[in-house]
Image (cartoon, rainbow, N blue to C red):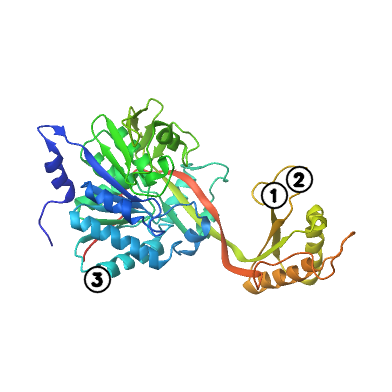
Amino acid sequence: MSTRPDHLERLRAQLIQGGRRAPFRALSASGQLGNGVLEPAFREGLKRAPHSIGADMGSVDPGPNYLGSGRMAPSDTIARRDLGLLLEGARALDVPLIIGSAGTGGAKPHLEHTLELVRAVAREKGLHFRLASISADMPRELIKAAIRRNEVTPIGAIDPLTEAEVDGAAHIVGQMGVEAFQRALRAGADVVIAGRACDTAVFSSIPAALGYPMGAAMHMAKIIECCSIACMPGGRDSALGTLDDDGFTMESMNASRHATPLSVAAHSLYEQSDPYTVSEPEGTLHVEQARYIALDEHRCRVEGAQWVPAARASVKIEGATRVGERALLLAGSADPRVIERIQTILAEVEQVVRGIVAGEYRMWFRVYGIDGVVLWPQPPEHMPREVFILGEVIADTPDLAKAATTVLKQYLLHHGFPGRLSTAGNVAFPITPPEVQTGTAYRFSVYHVMQVDELAPLFPVTIEDL
């Protein structure tokens, strides 16, 4: 075991002289790690000698399937590529690498699979470092006890959480804040791979531990965590945040993407119902007094954010529950007679299917061009020239889902209606077979905030030397 100072101690000695803090540089490598780090911008970021490198790897944005199934959204091939770039870059500079929300969902299977990839990359590239992993799986009995104390609150339109929903969820995770990352770094970690985590904690945990103002550190983290999305034009290139005691500067590592006062301020709306506050486990970031200043056409300076510590810590908890086995039908039509009557046709065909295929299953349709994205209260005044029809069936078994979908295909293809001209087929199929079985379907059943007395016991840290 190494006896050298941990990265926090080394950075403190490097950056703080005579009570004054030198600027801290945080490189945001990717907001979607595993989907392809843009290498030219990342290499440019390494040239800036960052004091830390971070990346977010997960989110609820891809939907409940990944959290429920325990599978990772990106391919192993690209995830290994991205991990290799970041690990080599961080070890070459000897700076800490922090990755949050491992493997998309951040639950135990996602974290374990990501750690397997990290170990494989380390062996392949001959890298040696101290690796910390942080679990984010929530103890179910603790959640149920919090429910009984009325200490669990819904987020948005989801129902109040019940103990039955807790028991029924495939996985339940909590979003860790800065505390867990700081604990891992104090244990001597060079690389931290965390389960489900707040995106901001990936980038604010180190400067917060070094004493930089929490408001500025957290605001910087909020802006850079998605890399160059906060630029004009937005993109996924790596971004650099340079933090000091008064604020921070945002800069894309792609010279063609410009951080402007408008683009950076607008990013405060990203994934936020309230553009002026960002709630975290340890407190709340307030940006209503923030000022956005153009240093030049490429860089934006930000000052004025405030941090209010929480009277009591809280954790956002997320869980997904199985709802059945899913099959899809993919079809389209350019027949104006079909398009005009599409809702009636679909309802009539569904009745035919239910008369043939017995069992419990749900069936519904999205007609892209009419109501596929938004359920408009009334159809458009002028019907589109063509539509895409997505039929979905969810049943208890894969066989029943497939049975309903194949019968649906055949009777939709040849459904008779007044004014029909073609008896050979009313719809077209883009691929064959047009029935696609997608596996188990999940729904978000836990999307709540839980009050807690202590954060550390919820997010245990494990250390290993590679």
Which residue is denoted by mark 3 in the rendering?
123
Closest to the observer: 23 or 165? 23
Which residue is denoted by mark 2 in the rendering?
379
Residue at x-position 44% and y-position 57%: 105
Tag of residue 415:
none
Looking at the image, can residue 462 be seen? no
Q: Quadrant of residue 165?
A: bottom right
Secondary element at tag 1: loop
User: Left or right: 229 with respect to 218?
Assistant: right
Pinpoint residue 122: horizontal percent, then vertical percent.
25, 67
Badge 2 vs badge 3, beta-carbon distance below 8 Å: no
Pinpoint residue 133: horizontal percent, then vertical percent.
29, 59
| CA distance separating discs 2 and 1 | 8 Å
Residue at x-position 19% and y-position 57%: 92
Secondary element at tag 2: loop
Quadrant of the snapshot with the N terminus: bottom left
Pinpoint residue 301: horizontal percent, then vertical percent.
32, 32
Of labels 2 and 3, earlier in sequence is 3
Q: Amino acid at mark 2?
A: Pro
Badge 1 vs badge 3, beta-carbon distance below 8 Å: no
Badge 2 vs badge 1, beta-carbon distance below 8 Å: yes
Which residue is denoted by mark 1 in the rendering?
371
Q: Is residue 109 above or below residue 145?
A: below
Q: Amino acid at mark 1?
A: Asp
Residue projecting furthest to the top? 289
Pinpoint residue 22: horizontal percent, then vertical percent.
17, 36
| CA distance separating discs 2 and 3 | 58 Å
User: 10 Å neighbourhood of mark 3: few (<14), some, or many (≥20)?
Assistant: few
Residue projecting furthest to the right? 418
Q: Amino acid at mark 3?
A: Arg
